[in-house]
Amino acid sequence: MEIHEWMIRNTRQTEWIDRRGLFLWLALYTGGLGGGLYLVSLYFNSLLGMVIAWFIVAILKGGFHLAFLGKPWRFWRIMSRPQTSWLARGFIFVVSFIAFAAMQIIASIWLPGTLWELTFKIMAGLAALGLTTYAGFVLNNVKSIPFWRSALLPILFVMCGLLGGFGLVVVIALYHGNINLIAAEAGSRWLLIANALLIVVYLWSAAQKGAACKQSVIEQIQGSASSVFWVGVTMLGIIVPIIIGFSGYFVHEASTSLLLISVLCEIIGGLSLRYSILKVGIYQPLLPSSRYEE
């Protein structure tokens, strides 16, 4: 049997993050962001937030996914195996959300307070929850990349989507008075802390696993993805928003410009987190390398 390097060495995956894979990275983030924004908008009863969430999923996520697929006109075939494929379930969540959220928005405008509006809110909310969840399970089911095979990963993606949703709701609250800005800021602030702790636990637990998983953690904090992790995820995505968020306790109210900077940093942090996780996904070797080393 001919032995190839990837069969006996840890090998970084490239299909899901390099070249056309960048579209998948953007699709995974915008799906979580749109789903998270819709769920948070349901909580605050913000019709504007629901409309923006619909556009994020239908236009941005849908467009990025179609750009990623080599033959986008065949994407319907992916939906044919929902009983075994999280990718198929994801496409069903996307299509369901686009349909139910559109009907909910129409019902909220023309039939507010009716059973129709409530029904479509529930259906769209369930689809939005699926949107924020499925990307983590898609990665979680790639058995040959141990760094992604963690029960914490889907939770981390959900928390990240909700954090982005709270951030965008803060922006909406700044210019649309029917949202409680203080409550939106508080939700964003505490989700930031929860996300930071979850990232630490995720990396710590991954470092306790096999060689491929440990190498992924090293690449995350010291190697190819370290600049994205420390600058994008840690500094911009966590530290800057936390400083701005908690400065409100001392100056009573952060300025509009600071809040906008904080939300922008949260979005950059979410994008950076998805990128770094995809970037350091490493296939474990099929064969023990010691047998073939000279």
Image (cartoon, rainbow, N blue to C red):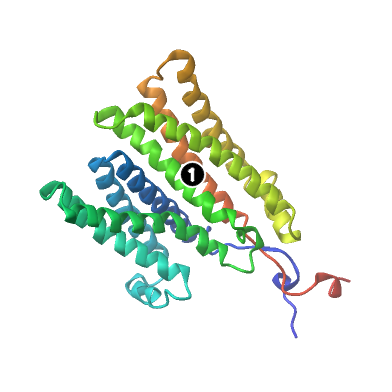
Q: Tell which of 108 and 5 is nearer to you.
A: 108
Position of residue 36 measured from the top left corner of the image (x, y, whole percent):
39, 47
What's the residue type where badge 1 is placed? Gly
Residue at (37% x, 51% y) in the render: 35
Image quadrant for the C terminus?
A: bottom right
Residue at (39% x, 61% y) in the render: 65
Image quarter for residue 145?
bottom right
Q: Tell which of 120 and 256 is nearer to you.
A: 120
Q: Residue furthest top?
A: 251
Position of residue 222 measured from the top left corner of the image (x, y, whole percent):
70, 44
Residue at (31% x, 42% y) in the render: 41
Q: Is residue 69 visible?
A: no
Q: Tell which of 11 and 270 is nearer to you.
A: 270
Q: Residue furthest right?
A: 294
Depicted 45 relative to depicted 115: above or below: above
Position of residue 233 measured from the top left corner of the image (x, y, whole percent):
55, 40
Position of residue 54 measured from the top left corner of the image (x, y, whole percent):
28, 51
Depicted 141 relative to depicted 166: above or below: below
Count every numbered label the image shows and give the total: 1
Residue at (41% x, 64% y) in the render: 90
Image quarter for residue 124?
bottom left
- Per the image, the residue denoted by label 1 is 270
Image quarter for residue 144?
bottom right
